[in-house]
Amino acid sequence: MSQGTAIIVGAGPGLGMSVARAFAGEGHPVALLSRDLGTTQRYASELTEAGLVARVYRADAGDPAELTDVIDLAIHELGAPEVLVYNPSLMQADRPAEVSAKDWDRTLR
């Protein structure tokens, strides 16, 4: 039985890749979405070198139209999703008491 695609939005070195490894290992094709194609391609090669199906897509989760278009492309290329993991993050040095409302809004987007 064919497994549905696992789409990972925010495929970074921690949780995103751990989830991708788990689903790919169970036979799901994996779509890895992130803002950084180069780094994410290195993560995907770890999966493809093990004989698993993984593709990389560039998308900014803060841009709803772009994210929708890229998810649609991944579905077209890999098939209907069985799993969608939304795990984007914005890494920056700050202190919680010193974050401006504008920066907080940007982080949430």
Image: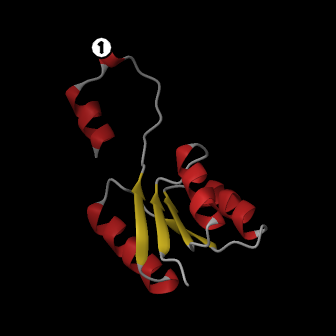
**Residue at coordinates 56% horizontally, 69% vertically from top-left?**
30
Residue 11: % across, % down: 53, 54
**Residue at coordinates 61% horizontally, 67% vertically from top-left?**
26
Nearest the viewer among 15 and 22 is 22
**102 relative to 88 in the view: left or right:** left
Residue under circle 1?
97
Say which amino acid is labelled 1.
Ala
Q: Which quadrant: the N terminus?
A: bottom right
**69 relative to 29 in the view: left or right:** left
Residue 86: % across, % down: 39, 54
Q: In the displayed orientation, state which residue is furthest to the top.
A: 97
Nearest the viewer among 101 and 57 is 57
**23 relative to 90 in the view: left or right:** right
Give neighbour class at mark 1: few <14, some 14-19, many 20+ (Cα, 10 Å): few
**Residue at coordinates 28% horizontally, 62% vertically from top-left?**
64
**Residue at coordinates 58% horizontally, 43% vertically from top-left?**
14
